[in-house]
Image (cartoon, helix red, strand yellow):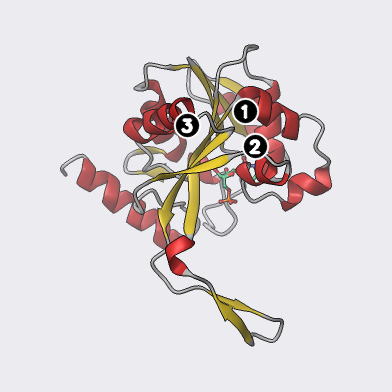
Amino acid sequence: MAVALIVAAGRGERLGSGRPKALVTLAGRPMLEWSVEALRAVPSVSAIVVALPIEAVDLAPAGCVAVAGGAVRSQSVQAALAAAPAGDDPVLVHDAARPLADASLFAAALAELERSGADAVVAAAPVTDTIKQVRTGLEVERTLDRSLLWAAQTPQVFRREALERVLVDASDELLARATDDAWLIERAGGSVRILPAPADNIKVTTPRDLHLAETLLRQRAGG
Ligand code: C5P
């Protein structure tokens, strides 16, 4: 079995909707509910914990454990992990801002953790742009080898003991630097593997992303 943590405590300021991003209506329902529904369709997921902005904790979908998130994303993961049922089952972390992730992607990530024996598995898509690394002043320092680059997404799945080791006592300063949870495992010397995932598993940040996500969800539903 596995425990799923959905982080949904972002303010969504870049979306400009005036309410938490995870609760913005997307293809007929709050964005968060797409991820909850997909996770409920994964037989091995036994519990779902959702981190929400403190004023929205009572808006969590029925049947989920609700917890107040933190000031930065990794603090929300930390709070959700602390509220998860005890045990040593794998932990799946997912951003509510990625409503296109489906049950098969969640199940594949959990299966890859089991198969590989790694500490963490990260859904990611191959990078299609050429990536330039610059110095301050926008002078190009070098061009990275695109064949080795993957854009990290969620879900990210973890051995519970490995995630607890890096998160439980992490300083606020470290958590503020972490743009994903797998990085915390990497810097502690743990093993992290990529699970190739669809580029369609976009993160909704801007109104344009919201429009694209809506189009993709409606296409998937055949309407
Ligand atoms: O801000 P960003 O889009 O990178 O957030 C990614 C995910 O992390 C979103 O699902 C957002 O709700 C969540 N988040 C959170 N707590 C924060 C900031 C972001 O749960 N303090």
Viewport quadrant of the C terminus = top left
Mark before the other along the chain sequence, 3 or 1: 1
| Residue drawn at 48 percent across, 48 percent down | 153
Q: What element carries label 3?
A: helix
Q: Which amino acid does label 2 sit on?
A: Pro
Image coords of residue 146 (percent x, y): 45, 68
Dividing the image into four equal quarters, which quarter contains ligand 1?
top right
**Residue for badge 2:** 53
> Residue at the spot x=59%, y=24% of the render?
58
- Give the labeled residue for mark 1: 57
What residue sits right under mark 3 in the picture? 116
* Residue 208 lies in quadrant: bottom left
Q: Is mark 1 in CB contact (under 8 Å) with mark 2?
A: yes
Give whichever of discs 3 and 2 has the lower sequence position.
Answer: 2
**20 sits to left or right of 202:** right
* Structural crowding at the residue carrying mark 2, measured as other residues with C-alpha within 10 Å and reported as few (<14), some (14–19) or many (≥20): many
Residue 67 pos. (x, y %):
65, 25
Q: For disc 1, does the CB lie below 8 Å from ligand 1? A: no
Judge left or right: residue 222 versus residue 198: left
Residue 37 appears in the picture as rendered: yes
Number of residues whose C-alpha sits closer than 10 Å to that of mark 1, classed few (under 14), some (14–19) or many (20 or more): some
Q: Is mark 1 on a helix, strand or loop?
A: helix
The amino acid pointed to by label 3 is: Ser
